[in-house]
């Protein structure tokens, strides 16, 4: 069962920052927060992950609250190609907890 | 990131026939591979997890005799849908991981249509 809650859909103007929230209030101390996205009819693409510190890579930034009960994925300058379904996933590293379980995600629509 | 390929990208088969889908990790050794299924407008559902050289572990509700998974090498896993029926029509996606502490990468998916 998915352990995260995300808004169903969001819109963002091209060139603006897209901020995608995720609630994971039952996250355990050794579980990571992962973000993937899925462009229509393709396999999911890894974006970023973190444990408790904020993370940044060439694609996005991940902001995790101090209590780790929620996080925000930030796409700093959204483009039309960022239109996709974004999945926030909590994952452990051993046994069944290490499986990636997908929820319903947030459908991000980037518009001109 | 690492590359995972799937073949074929799409397949149409007649009801009652079997279809094999291949999943390969191209630039890393995948100790664990995963198979997901996705119906239109739905999220990905994990079907099974396989470790190289071991039998696959199937999720609850997934028929192991219908969805045969083989993970004979560190770079190849296959999913065979046996005696396919129209309700098996779906988007099948494989995923591979080098180890428990490594990232999980996904293939591009295979769209199966059973007529």
Image (cartoon, grey):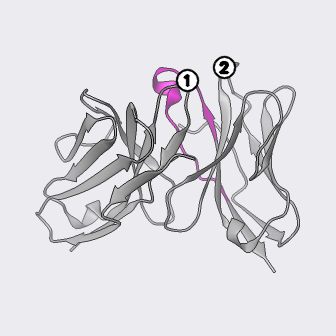
Contact? badges 2 and 1 (CB < 8 Å): yes
Q: Quadrant of the C terminus of chain B?
A: bottom left
Residue A112 x %, y %? 81, 80
Q: Which residue is drawn at 43% across and 45% down?
A: B95
Q: Nearer the viewer, residue B67 or A57?
A: A57
Give the total number of marks visible in the rendering. 2
Q: Residue at x 71, y 49 (%)?
A: A6
Residue A13 x %, y %? 84, 72
- Above or below A21: residue B57: above
* Residue A90 counted in the magenta span: yes
Q: Nearer the viewer, residue B50 or B83?
A: B50
- Above or below A15: residue A57: above
For label 1, the crowd category at 10 Å Cα-Cα, with few meaning under 14, some 14 to 19 and many 20 or more, is some
* Residue A75 counted in the magenta span: no
Task: Please state if A96 lies on the left or on the right of A74 as rendered.
Answer: left
Mark carried by residue A28 = none
Q: Residue at x 73, y 28 (%)?
A: A51
Q: Please state the extent of the stretch shown in magenta in the rendering.
A: A89-106
Q: Mark 2 falls within which chain? A: A
Mark positioned earlier in the residue sequence (2 or 1): 2
For label 2, the crowd category at 10 Å Cα-Cα, with few meaning under 14, some 14 to 19 and many 20 or more, is few
Residue bearing mark 2: A30
Residue B51 x %, y %? 33, 29
State the SS at label 2. loop
Mark carried by residue A93 = 1
Tell me which corner region of the image, top left, top right, bottom left or bottom right, holds residue B15. bottom left
- Above or below A70: residue B36: below
Tell me which corner region of the image, top left, top right, bottom left or bottom right, holds residue A26. top right
């Amino acid at each position: 069962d998915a352990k995260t809650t995300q808004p169903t859909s969001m819109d963002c103007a091209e060139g603006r920052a897209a901020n995608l929230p995720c609630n994971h209030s039952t996250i355990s101390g050794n579980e990571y927060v992962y973000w993937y996205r899925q462009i229509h009819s393709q396999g999911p693409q890894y974006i970023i992950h973190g444990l408790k510190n904020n993370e940044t890579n060439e694609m996005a930034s991940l902001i995790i609250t101090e209590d780790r009960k929620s996080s925000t994925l930030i796409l700093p300058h959204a483009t039309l190609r960022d239109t996709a379904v974004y999945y926030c996933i909590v994952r452990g590293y051993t046994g069944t907890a290490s499986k990636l379980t997908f929820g319903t995600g947030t459908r991000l629509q980037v518009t001109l | 990131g690492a590359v995972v390929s799937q073949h074929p990208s799409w397949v149409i088969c007649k009801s009652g026939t079997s279809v094999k889908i291949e999943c390969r990790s191209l630039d890393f050794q995948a100790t664990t591979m995963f198979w997901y299924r996705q119906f239109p407008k739905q999220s990905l559902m994990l079907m099974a997890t396989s470790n190289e050289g071991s039998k696959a572990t199937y999720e609850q509700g997934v028929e192991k005799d219908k969805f045969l998974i083989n993970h004979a090498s560190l770079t190849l896993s296959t999913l065979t849908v046996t005696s396919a029926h129209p309700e098996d029509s779906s988007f099948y996606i494989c995923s591979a991981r080098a180890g428990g502490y490594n990232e999980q990468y996904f293939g591009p998916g295979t769209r199966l249509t059973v007529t």
